[in-house]
Image: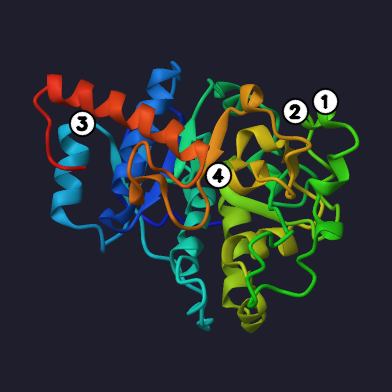
Amino acid sequence: MASTRLSTEPAAVTSKKVWTTLITNTAYLTGLLTLDYSLKKHNTKYPLVALYTDTFPPDGHKALDERGIPKQHVKYLLPSVQKDFTNDPRFYDCWSKLTPFSLEEYDRVVQLDSDMLVLQNMDELMEMSLDPPSAAGKGDRVFAASHACVCNPLKKPHYPKDWVPENCAFTSQHADPDAAQHTGAPADFGLGMPNGGLQVVNPSAAVYNLILEQLSNPSSMDYDFADQSLLGDLFRGRWVALPYTYNALKTLRNKGVHEQIWRDGEVKNVHYILSPKPWDEQAGKCSQESHEWWWAVNRERLEKEKGEGVVDGF
């Protein structure tokens, strides 16, 4: 089978195991820079590679280059038939988060969203067991991710009717919060949908071709949540469910959502889903405590960069 790599460019780094994050514009660039800083702060052995699309502007490139953050060009990925995501425009970019499955120049890719903050080292994700590329997407451990929260805690009217607490994998863990710190609910529980913010992947042309085939199918128009809907459907129950601690959606901490399982000291990686992002708010005046955690680390980063002569407003 011919390689389906999206880019003919060489690998951005010599490491065969990498963190990646997708960047299409500068709206999330401050988040990416702080994510990179937080990975290094907690002594990761692996580099973060910024996967940029053609829409990423020159001032963004300059900011990455000045900080020595490696980058690699990828194509913008979209289904053959476009779905209208007017209610959630963030999902237009999300299809491209499936790109890591195609990056065969690496043995292991852990894709992270740029609106994340690492609080503890999680290099073990680079070592965990997944199906080898030769399994061609037919095995039971195609990739690893944490579950999506399907409670719709903000009661968004355009969300599907089956997005209710009874169908949420995290609800099933309320009775045993100790286990929830180190074990995910079964991958096929409830709606069986992974959250696309963190994906642990062994890149494989065969798996990527399955994804592309699904993207070319008009049924992809039915996916309300872009990449994560596709992965949950295509590999139903055949992915490894990580505990919430690796992709701790900030809303889980809220009273009446999943505070039963949330423990600040156990969280390895916070995901600042939805708006506002921490950088949209003012330090000391944030709408929620977890945003202040981000600001504390962001201040550290800015101080360090200032000492190195990098002051560009990002």
Q: Mark 4 Cα within 10 Å, few/some/many (few <14, many 20+)?
A: many
Which residue type carries mark 3?
A: Arg
Residue 303 image label: none
Measured as percent of width and height from the top left, residue 284 is found at 37, 36
Residue 178 image label: 1
The residue pinned by badge 3 equals 67
Front label number (4 vs 3)? 3
Front label number (1 vs 3)? 1
Disc 1 to disc 3, how far (Cα)? 39 Å
Disc 2 to disc 3, how far (Cα)? 34 Å
Regarding residue 125, the answer to whether it shows in the image is yes
The residue pinned by badge 2 equals 181
Answer left or right for 134 relative to 17.
right
Q: Mark 1 Cα within 10 Å, few/some/many (few <14, many 20+)?
A: few
Residue lying farthest to the top in this orientation: 43
Q: Circle 2 sits in a helix, a strand or a loop, which is it?
A: loop
Residue 203 image label: 4
Regarding residue 3, the answer to whether it shows in the image is no
Disc 4 to disc 3, how far (Cα)? 27 Å
